[in-house]
Image (cartoon, rainbow, N blue to C red):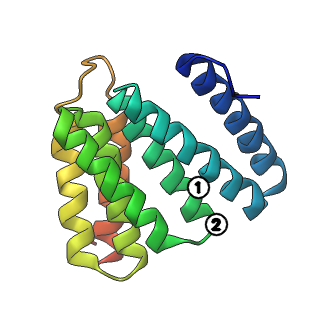
Amino acid sequence: LLQGQSDDCRCSTLETFRWAHVVALGATGSRDHALAVVRLQDRRIELLGMMERFRDQGEAMSNAAEHLLDAQKRQEAEGYFVRARAVGAAHGFFSVECTACLGLGRVAMLEGRHEECLELMRNALAASSLRENESDTMMELEVLRHLTDALFQTRQID
């Protein structure tokens, strides 16, 4: 199906299949659909890198990581978040770095690494204020929500 198509068309086709699995995941909660999303994202991640669409590549890495968390695969998710953070940092995409740091912080919290969690979430907050799109403030609010929750869970605030 993908052979002979342009890179843009292949990317769009993979994205369409990914969305179909996301919808199925929402309907069924099946880990199989979460892992299918990750397999599709792996193909998109490679293709996006070849196309030098690094923001999209980093976002796809974080998306794959989120689905791995849904499938209870924390270590694999952490690897994707680490890669996404590196892509964001290397290419100056603070939104990608922010999302990755937030994800890494959530993984650290789940693993009981509280100090690391708080440091990563503070990094995410700093990156969220440097976003590329000045009108997008939702990321800051999302990071603050998770950071506040982490501070309560670690009893740093009551």
Q: Is residue 46 left or right of residue 11?
A: left
Q: Is residue 80 left or right of residue 14?
A: left
Q: Is residue 158 above or below residue 105?
A: below
Q: Judging from the image, what secondary structure is the residue with disc 2 in?
A: loop
Tell me the crowding category of disc 1: few under 14, some 14 to 19, or many 20 or more residues within 10 angstroms, Cα based.
many
Name the residue located 28 percent from the left edge and 54 percent from the top edge: 101
Determine the residue located farthest toward the bottom in the rendered image.
Answer: 112
Instruction: Let me know if residue 39 appears in the view.
Output: yes
Q: Is residue 9 above or below residue 123?
A: above
Q: Give how far across and how far down residue 58 sits, in percent.
A: 37, 40
Which residue does the numbered mark 1 point to in the structure image?
A: 67
Amino acid type at circle 2 is Ala
Q: Are marks 1 and 2 in contact (CB under 8 Å)?
A: yes
Q: Give how far across and how far down residue 83 sits, in percent.
A: 33, 53
Amino acid type at circle 1 is His
Write down the quadrant of residue 80 in the picture.
bottom left
Name the residue located 28 percent from the left edge and 72 percent from the top edge: 158
Write down the quadrant of residue 138 in the picture.
top left
Q: Judging from the image, what secondary structure is the residue with disc 1 in?
A: helix
133 or 146, which is in the foreground?
A: 133
- The residues bearing labels 1 and 2 have C-alpha atoms spaced at a distance of 6 Å
Q: Give how far across and how far down residue 20 sits, in percent.
A: 77, 36
Which dot marks residue 71? Answer: 2
Q: Give how far across and how far down residue 67 sits, in percent.
A: 59, 55
Name the residue located 48 percent from the left edge and 34 percent from the top edge: 47
